[in-house]
Image (cartoon, grey):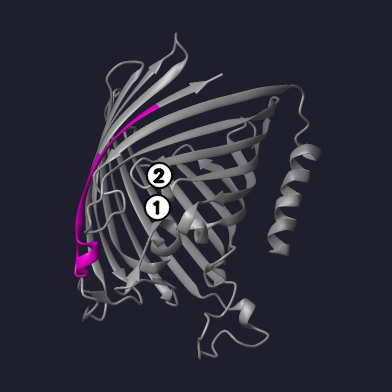
Amino acid sequence: MKTIKSIIALVIIALFVFGQPLTAQFNIRSTLSTMADDNVNNNALQLKSNVTTLNLNSGYSWENENNYTSLYYDGSFTYYESFLQRTNHFHSVDVEFIQLYGEEDQNILTAGGLLGTSINRDDFVIFDHSQLSGFMNYKYFLNDWLINKIGYSVKAISFSSLNDFSFTEHVIFVHAAFAATSTTTAILQADLGTKFYSSTPSGSSSSMRKGSLSSLMPSVTQLTGMVKLGQRITDELGVSITERYQWNIQKQTRYLSSDYGFISDDELFDDHYGYEGFHTNAAITSLLSESITLKLSGGLQNKLYSSLSAYDLSGNVVADQRIDARMYGNILLQKEFVDLGFNLKTSMDVIRNISNDAYYDYSNNAITVELSVPF
């Protein structure tokens, strides 16, 4: 944790020492979204709820010829109409710095970080946590047809009531984008991520994490490879297909126990470190006009859980390993009302999750409308 704080402090110092801001500008943006979800918990119970989220982003930015600095507050409040106990809010202070390099300012260094806290209510207060994170990446042009990017990020999550799930994550990545033709782009990326849990699980008899070197031994290590092909059909129409595979080199992921076996929820317990497999995605993007964008996307994700069994609804083990096949589709329509000063998005999501664990064999349909107003 001290290392992460030092990194964030250095980033903030760099913003104001090397940023050389000339003028300051105050920015504020408010976003309101409402979603009708027929399976808000993503499980076999199929419980419905309308979910409303209000987001406020405000702060100052400084800009000159070759760098940009911003310091802002970001907060969100999420209200569950049918499940008031799940209502929560998140607040953070964020900082970002962008520096341009090269003869034509085409190389870009980006750095930033945030300090935030999540606040829940009723039984969900056990999910209250604080977050401290930072990142830095550098994109540079080798020539007219090859762009490289390298980066590093660090994130620390500390739970006030679930200390066994507090962790620090480190990720490094390398990225290369090739212009195969004037209309075809290929992107290759590799990520190596590690997750360090803050403590040995309560009641654990394992000695693997004990000793003076325990803080140097990650609990989970994951290698991810990604290939993306993009094709511009016309100036207004483009298609892309992405293939990703993630492999867990080390498998000590932790899951939260429930009455019937195990549950997984959002990034905390169903984060990508908990499973491995292929993920295929395809998308079509069309500019219907200068202000209207239509995007159709869908995919299939195979999820082989590293250390999680499959159960029936009575709590009996039916397989040593939980295996899911997640199919999904999305339709997104976005309209920018330039003269009126706001953006409007509407989307529909369809999900079918096939699992050998009966509790996670489900379907999910959701419709979302989002209004964004910059001031």
364 to the left or right of 342: left
Whether residues under marks 2 and 1 lie with C-beta atoms below 8 angstroms apart, the answer is yes
Secondary structure, magenta segment, majority class: strand
Which region is colored magenta?
Answer: 349-370
Secondary structure, mark 1, is: strand
x, y percent for residue 324: 24, 64
Label 1 is placed on what type of residue? Leu
Secondary structure, mark 2, is: strand
Would you say residue 260 sits in the magenta stretch?
Answer: no
**Which residue is found at the position 59% from the left and 46% from the top?**
138
Q: Quadrant of residue 315?
A: bottom left
Would you say residue 356 sits in the magenta stretch?
Answer: yes
Establish if 307 lies above or below 362: below
Establish if 312 lies above or below 49: below
Q: Is residue 132 visible?
A: yes
Q: Residues within 10 Å of mark 1 (few under 14, many from 20)?
A: some
The answer to which of marks 2 and 1 sits earlier in the sequence is 2
**Which residue is found at the position 29% from the left and 73% from the top?**
260
Establish if 245 lies above or below 14: below
Label 2 is placed on what type of residue? Phe
Identify residue for label 2: 178
**Which residue is found at the position 53% from the left and 60% from the top?**
171
> Which quadrant: the C terminus?
top right
x, y percent for residue 230: 31, 40
Q: Residues within 10 Å of mark 2 (few under 14, many from 20)?
A: some
x, y percent for residue 124: 46, 57
Q: Quadrant of residue 110?
A: top right
Identify residue for label 1: 188
